[in-house]
Image (cartoon, helix red, strand yellow):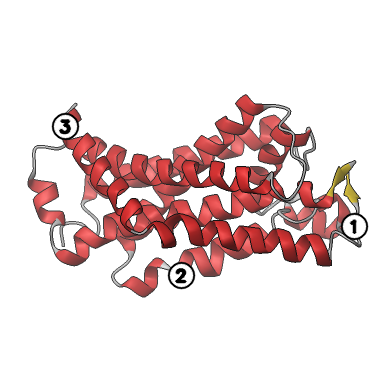
Amino acid sequence: MNVHAVRAIFAFEMSRTWRTLMQSVVSPVISTSLYFIVFGAAIGSRIPEVGGVSYGAFIVPGLIMLSLLTQSISNASFGIYFPKFSGTIYELLSAPVSYFEVVLAYVGAAATKSIILGLIILATAALFVPLHVEHPGWMLLFLVLTSVTFSLVGFIIGIWADGFEKLQIVPLLIVTPLTFLGGSFYSIDMLPPFWQTVALFNPVVYLVSGFRWSFYGLADVSLWLSLGMTLAFLVASLVIVAWIFRTGWRLKN
């Protein structure tokens, strides 16, 4: 493995975060804080507890997951799209760097940013509500797996997109609505039976459920089903990325 190349790409991507600190870190943290204030005041007063957990604390995993999904996709998609836009992607493809090393560097940097942001939001949440993580190991596992998986999804979107506006289509029109409808702010057990069944077709339900279980031991679906679905998304994303590099789709034309 060309460690120097991986480290160079990784360092370059991470340095972009520090240059745009307001947009990359401060803005998502402020947005999440506003969710706590608005939802805590407007809905928390009407729903004091969910499953024995205060409503403000209950929504913490969902808010972290919302930021995690959107930021992972955004960081990874822009990271690979900009070299395409500027034309430097051809220098990267002709360099003595394998496709595995390219994906490892770009996806690794995007996932690292998302994990750091998730931990910052978790620390911020502790300022608003009392938090207790019952299974910190599982919490970190879901945090890492989700960040890596959706960074791969963002990498795919960055290769697919042929304009800056397309980088926002999937996060805004698909991922964010699925997250809001995926039990981020409520338990799907609160829904009528028909809509509970419909909700199970939403992949975000499994991510949020497993992540919330690591905090409070509460879950809408089985822990192992959540873990299995997360791993299935990861494998599917890896297969698509491997196909893209094998065929050169959107890279060599």
Secondary element at tag 3: helix
Q: Which quadrant is the N terminus positioned in? A: top left
As drawn, the residue found furthest toward the front would be 127
- Cβ–Cβ under 8 Å for marks 3 and 2: no
Residue under circle 2? Answer: 169
For the point 66% across and 37% down, the residue is: 226
Decide if residue 85 is on the left or right side of residue 216: left
Residue under circle 3? Answer: 4
The mark nearer the N terminus, 1 or 2, is 1
For the point 24% across and 61% down, the residue is: 82
Secondary element at tag 1: loop
Q: Which quadrant is the C terminus positioned in? A: bottom left
Decide if residue 210 is on the left or right side of residue 20: right
Dot 1: few (<14), some (14–19), or many (≥20) neighbours within 10 Å?
A: few
**Identity, as a three-letter code, of the amino acid under mark 2:** Ile
**Identity, as a three-letter code, of the amino acid under mark 3:** His
Residue under circle 1? Answer: 47
